[in-house]
Image: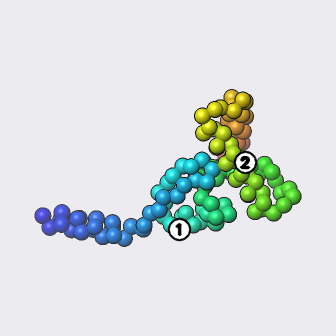
Amino acid sequence: MVLSESKAKTQQQAIRLAPPLEVAECCCCGFKEECTPGYARRVRERHGGRWACGLCEEAVRDAMAAAGAGPGSEAARLEEALTLHSDLCKRCRSPVPPRHSAEELIGHLKRLLRRVLDAQRRGGRD
């Protein structure tokens, strides 16, 4: 009996000490996720004040890497990559599919597969 009371008290303390959660919505795809305010703040800092889910963050990072260190600041390249990816997400959620949706999907999957295979050849993760 004493052991179970001690367990219950420990669980109650853990619940009280748990950090508060907030629901963050991805600026690209609309995915909602519960996360701590600190994590949400760090993600927003990386994306110009907007929150992006992990998948969209990877896609934006890939788009920025593909653009290279071209003209404009990193903030401008980030903005462009976020806008392009947001537009892609909106087209994919649209009830009317784009004219070349199969080719577009194949192209994205091909780039993803190449990236995974390149990472395996290097023996690490990107």
| Residue type pointed to by label 2 | Leu
Q: Residues within 10 Å of mark 2 (few under 14, many from 20)?
A: some
Rendering coords of residue 35 (x, y %): 49, 60
**Numbered circles on residues, count:** 2
Rendering coords of residue 28 (x, y %): 63, 50
Decide if residue 114 is in sight here.
no
How far, Cα to Cα, is label 2 from label 1? 27 Å
Residue located at (54% from left, 49% from top): 31
| Residue type pointed to by label 1 | Gly
Residue located at (62% from left, 37% from top): 94
Residue located at (78% from left, 60% from top): 76
Decide if residue 41 is in sight here.
yes
Q: Quadrant of residue 25?
A: bottom right
Residue located at (69% from left, 45% from top): 87
Residue 75's disc is none
Here the colouring is: rainbow
Relative vertical location of residue 92 with respect to residue 76 in this rendering, above or below? above
Q: Secondary structure at mark 1?
A: helix
Q: Nearer the viewer, mark 2 or mark 1?
A: 2
Rendering coords of residue 8 (x, y %): 23, 65
Residue found at the very far right of the displayed protein: 71
Q: Secondary structure at mark 2?
A: helix
Quadrant location of the N terminus in the rendered image: bottom left
Relative vertical location of residue 57 with respect to residue 97 in this rendering, above or below? below
* Observer-nearest of 113 and 124: 113
Residue that mark 2 sits on: 84
Q: Residues within 10 Å of mark 1 (few under 14, many from 20)?
A: few
Residue found at the very far left of the displayed protein: 1
Rendering coords of residue 54 (x, y %): 59, 52
Residue that mark 1 sits on: 38
Q: Earlier in the sequence, mark 2 or mark 1?
A: 1
